[in-house]
Amino acid sequence: MQTTAQAELSSFELVRHYFHLAADELALQDDLRDVLLRPYREVQVAIPMRLRDGRIRTFSGYRVQHNGARGPFKGGVRFHPEVDLDEFRALAGLMTWKTAIAGIPFGGAKGGIDCDPRLLDAAELEKLTRAYMQRIDKVLGPTRDIPAPDVNTNAQVMAWMMDEYGKGHGYTPAIVTGKPIALEGSYGREAATARGLVYLFREAAPTVNLVPSEATVAIQGFGNVGSWVGRLMQQLGARVIAVSDATGSIRAERGLDTGALAAYVRGGGRLAEYEADGVEAIGGEEFLATPCDVFVPAALGGMIHASNVHLLDCRLLLEGANGPTTPQADLALQERGVFIVPDVMANAGGVVVSYFEWVQNLQHFRWDEREVNERLGTIMRRAYREVSERAARKPGTSLRVAAFSLGIERVVEAARLRGNF
Ligand code: GLU
């Protein structure tokens, strides 16, 4: 998917590019690269649906299972008008590396529907979700493939998916993660991706001489990840001075009240029209150029690219979105000394707490939120330590290349031991 006119690479090419950089480091042979890049299974389904206005619209649904050497396939479900098979291939691959880097026993998958949920009412969204679940049901299962929320999907969507699956298989909460608390969802899952990012921010801050409680933060995208990063950063004492989303951008030098902003957006308010003391609306370029310590891309892929990277004025890039930075932008930032904590490691908190949810569901037992958050912290810090140690072995190695190569190495080891090739 090209999210901006200037984006120079699709997500598919972007992930392949980073994969090959790491594969070069590992001196991986071409035949092995081919095995690792190729998804295990790709499902594409047609979902015809009669809309309110009487017309029939046929949506496309997808589920790509990339690699299952380390465990059941795992990854989110995305509802977005511009998704296509190539994008899901890329995102499924990212999940394979992400779960391996985090050291949790899952493979990688991703799926979704090419719909714009803003144009559907709740009844249509439910119908579409259930029809999608019916069509991909055969390739899913708590020991096969476990979906979760992603862009434009949430706990309610997961509840419908679980219910639909249950019709044929009986009550199976472990079939999806990111469910509502009332349906065996896990405490802490909703904020988990953001909490993981903030844990890693605290680990990375000393590298760029930052004191977390004194940092200034700009957040691109204010959905689940962006809005929780805002709130958790603020809890830490950091100042969130600029936020943007698809409707526009705002800035507040003295810092935004991100809790109030999250409530406003959740209530259907447009970010660009948000009014509060000291808050001003700004243009998209001005937003990107806001001087800050930490810039958090938490929107779609490819948003930081060759044509806008020169605007960024930060010391640390904390990637909340999947694939937000194109290779050209990645290089430009590194040359300017910006420290990048890459998506495959930085945003793993979501799938890590999904793992906890799955474990709890298999035992029909519940952990309290403190336990979830503590265990999440342990896993995120371990991943950061392992990736940084690997990067330090060869000066000049980025955390991205080190993270990918750690993930690839673990998947290759598991596949070899199983005799997969
Ligand atoms: N959609 C999230 C991701 O991209 C979470 C996936 C999951 O929990 O399975 O990492």
Image: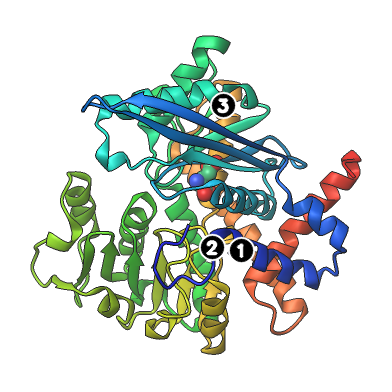
Q: Residues at badges 1 and 2 in contact (C-beta under 8 Å)? A: yes
Q: Position of residue 137 (x, y in %)?
A: 57, 22
Instruction: For mark 2, give the secondary structure.
Output: loop
Residue at mark 1: C-beta within 8 A of ligand 1: no
Q: Position of residue 47 (x, y in %)?
A: 45, 28
Query: Left or right: where does residue 363 sit relative to residue 8?
Result: right
Which numbered tag is attached to residue 276? none
Mark 3 or mark 2, earlier in chain: 2
Query: Left or right: where does residue 185 sit relative to residue 99?
Result: left
Which numbered tag is attached to residue 10? 2
Density class for disc 3 (Cα within 10 Å; few <14, some 14-19, many ≥20) is some
Specify whether residue 170 is in view.
no
Instruction: For mark 3, give the secondary structure.
Output: helix
Which quadrant of the structure image shows residue 354?
top right
Residue sitting at x 33%, y 52%:
223
Above or below: residue 129 compared with residue 97: above
Image quadrant for the C terminus? top right
Residue matched to label 3: 136
| Structural distance between the alpha carbons of marks 3 and 1 | 26 Å
Q: Residues at badges 3 and 1 in contact (C-beta under 8 Å)? A: no
| Structural distance between the alpha carbons of marks 1 and 2 | 5 Å
Above or below: residue 351 compared with residue 291: above
Residue matched to label 1: 13
Three-letter amino acid code at disc 1? Answer: Glu
